[in-house]
Amino acid sequence: MSQSNREQLRRNQAAQAKQKRLNRIIGVGAVVLVVVLIGVFIAVLFQNQAHTSTTSSATPPNATGSKDGIVVNPGKFTAGAPVVELFFDYQCPVCKQFEGIYGASLKSLAASGAIELRYRNMTFLDNNLNNDASLRAGIGAACSDFAGQYSAYHEQIFANQPAKEGDGYTDDMLRVTIPATVGITGADLTSFQSCYDQQTTKAFVSGTNEAASKGGVNATPTFHVNGKDLSLQTIAGVKPEGLGDLIKQNA
Amino acid sequence: MSCAEPGGVTAEPSYTDPVSDTSAISLHRRPWQEWATLAARLILGVTVLVAGLLKVTRLDASVQSVRLYQILPWDVAGFVGTALPILEVVVGLLLITGTFTRLAAIVGSALMVAFIIGIASVWARGISIDCGCFGGGGAIEASLTQYPLEILRDTGLLLTGAWTVWRPRAPFAVDNWLFAPLDPTASEPEPIAEDDKESTR
């Protein structure tokens, strides 16, 4: 009998010890889970904050219908003209080179109405270079569209690209120097600077980057004719004055 | 003789069954495999933790890196790019502290398999990117890609992970406390010794 009681007691103790051990394992597991959830929560919070810090937002007047870029020559192109889309990042050195070689040619094609020219701004180099210069340059460019100076402003950004990739654009360059160069003055300058300072076009620029990324464009410069990729190698095969014919052939 | 013993219930998953007299085994008597596991655990854990920490503060860049592989749909890549650094930090910490070691090593090994597949895939498709393994990333010149080296590194890490899954028991692990055997002082010859032999194969 006492043998049986001792046995019973031992069983109880063993069961208790086992329960205690199980509780310990579950407890530590739960702590790990809670810490993970808090970490995820903080990460999501930070990300949302980074994405929604603007107070006012506006879309440039010449934005494309789907807000994925800005039309450089609104109302000038003839109906049915090939749609040329240039994807670029303002911190991309090759984009500056491209602009230097083919920029003037593209603009004259746009001005003559032979093509509909759309600039689709990307900002992913901010992530690679760990700064926000692509985004700020994009915001400035989009703000300049309200003053009707988008194309000139765009050109000046590339003309003033820092020699060393990653140095980025200063605010002074984007809100004072370039507007002065392209002739944004007076009331236009005041509203331009207010637009830049309040990052009014930030959501739009983030949207153009996202739209390009969703469309599968992840390197710049990228050149599309009627939605089809025209490789840089192909373009490099023609002189700037031959660009119009090349576009026609690929339209 | 022991099948009716209450102690029989202490039979645990093989890695949680330190011989009942673990405390009596002095360090120099630990099998070398346990030290190998400690090394494997720390190599994988520290690497994964550092990789996670470098990315976790810049999740946008992490998402972008994942998208450059052009494997996952756009939205899924967004989720993976956000979750991956957090997962890496957690798995790294678990491995370093030796907490739920086998589970953490399984996840760590699975990550390495995924990375190797991802890198091999971009290599095969002729896409030129930095793997973005430790932050950074981005499209780069074809001549600057380091796919063989990156795959070799991840294969090495996969081996440390696989070893840890196989032999998760090691010194300096929270698991040694967490999964400590029941009441070692009261123990009689137990079948766990059998299990241990089994686990060491």
Image (spheres, rainbow, N blue to C red):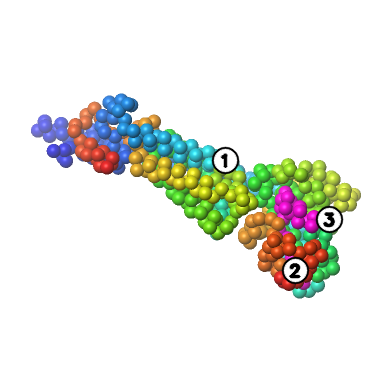
- Quarter-wise, where is residue B74 in the image? bottom right
In the displayed structure, B7 sits above or below A207; it is above
Give yes or no for residue A85 being in the magenta stretch: yes
Residue A191 magenta-drawn? no
Whether labels 2 and 1 belong to a single chain: the reply is no
Compare marks 2 and 3 and give the one earlier in the sequence. 3
| Chain part drawn in magenta | A81-101
Q: Which kind of residue does numbered mark 3 sit on?
A: Ala
- Residue B103 in sight from this viewpoint: no
Q: Amino acid at mark 1?
A: Leu
Using residue A183 as the reference point, say whether residue B122 is left or right of it. left
Q: Which residue is disc 2 drawn over?
A: A247
Specify the quadrant that holds the C terminus of chain A. Answer: bottom right
Q: Are the residues at dot 2 and dot 3 in contact (C-beta closer than 8 Å)?
A: no
Viewed as shown, does residue A160 lie left or right of B4?
A: right
Report the residue marked by disc 1.
B54
Residue, x 56% and y 43% (percent of image)? B134
Element under label 3?
helix
What residue would you read off at disc 3?
A152
Residue A230 horizontal side relative to residue A40, left or right = right
| Mark 3 Cα-neighbour bin, 10 Å: few <14, some 14–19, many ≥20 | some
Q: CA distance from mark 1 to mark 3?
A: 39 Å
Badge 2 and badge 3 both on one subunit: yes
Q: Position of residue B169 (x, y in %)?
A: 34, 36
Q: Residue furthest bottom?
A: A80
Cα distance in 3D space between marks 2 and 3: 23 Å
**Tag 2 near tag 1, CB within 8 Å:** no
Q: Amino acid at mark 2?
A: Ile
Can see residue B135?
A: yes
